[in-house]
Amino acid sequence: MKTKTSLKTLQMVQTAILAAILIVMAFTPLGYFNLGPVSITFLMIPVVIGAIVVGPAAGAFLGLVFGLSSFIKAFSDPLFGSILLNINWMYTLILCLVPRTLMGLLVGFIFRALSKIDKTKIVSFIISSASGALLNTALFLTGLILFFGNHPFITQFGSTPIVIFVTLAGANALIEAVICTVVGTAIAKALRKYLIDPKEPKAPAGPAE
């Protein structure tokens, strides 16, 4: 049995490792995949894994790291990011940080709630992993429309908020959800199995009397 101190240390180490992985992914091609006009990000995967394996607080922290990396990368983004920065850098900062932090926090709470009623936890892993990508898209685009919805740069994507949302979500939202579900479920399930929920070894049978 792990003591509270050793468990807390383990959780801090796990969170730090996932944060390091996220940073490496954010500033290398490992974190993004561009297919023509479609840009797919894999950065929500470490956030989802941390939220499931460690908990909501770790998910929120990793989401914050995700958001900070997005804001930094916006300065070198020749299209979307730099345009938003020029319109309003403060709104852009909030847009990068808040949705990603909330995403990590909510994924952790979703897994915690589902795992209480899902004995096998399979459904919990799948739904929680999928929710990471879906929440990332939904929260980000909601914030985008809230802060920049009246600007001509955003209204060019549609005449109403719903049209803008659907247009910007596009096919990449579905692709991200599928990838996050498959990869997040596989890794988080394996980590929880061997680090968090190990099966207690069975006691050897006593000698026959």
Image (tube, helix red, strand yellow):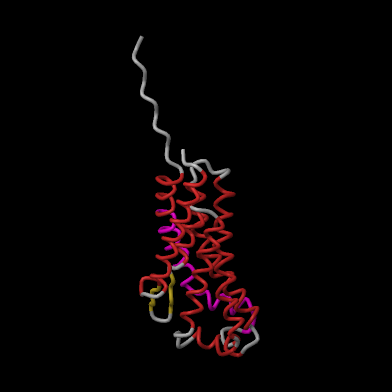
Question: Camera-side residue: 209 or 115?
Answer: 209
Query: Residue farthest to the left?
Result: 207
Residue drawn at x 61%, y 82% as measured from the top left? 90
Question: Camera-side residue: 54 or 190?
Answer: 54
**For residue 41, side relative to residue 114 (left or right):** left
Q: Quadrant of residue 56?
A: bottom right
Query: Residue farthest to the front?
Result: 5
Q: Is residue 39 above or below residue 204?
A: below
Q: Is residue 81 above or below residue 12?
A: below
Q: Is residue 78 above or below residue 196?
A: below
Q: Quadrant of residue 34?
A: bottom left
Q: Is residue 195 above or below residue 151?
A: above
Question: Camera-side residue: 147 or 208?
Answer: 208
Residue 205: x percent and y percent? 36, 20
Tag count in the figure?
A: 0
User: Which image quarter is the C terminus in?
Assistant: top left
Residue drawn at x 40%, y 73% as measured from the top left? 32
Q: Is residue 155 magenta?
A: no
Residue drawn at x 47%, y 65% as measured from the top left? 44
Residue 153: x percent and y percent? 57, 89
Residue 1: x percent and y percent? 46, 38
Q: What secondary structure characterizes most of the magenta part?
A: helix
**For residue 99, side relative to residue 206 (left or right):** right
Q: Where are the magenta residues, as a range?
A: 159-186
Residue 49: x percent and y percent? 46, 57
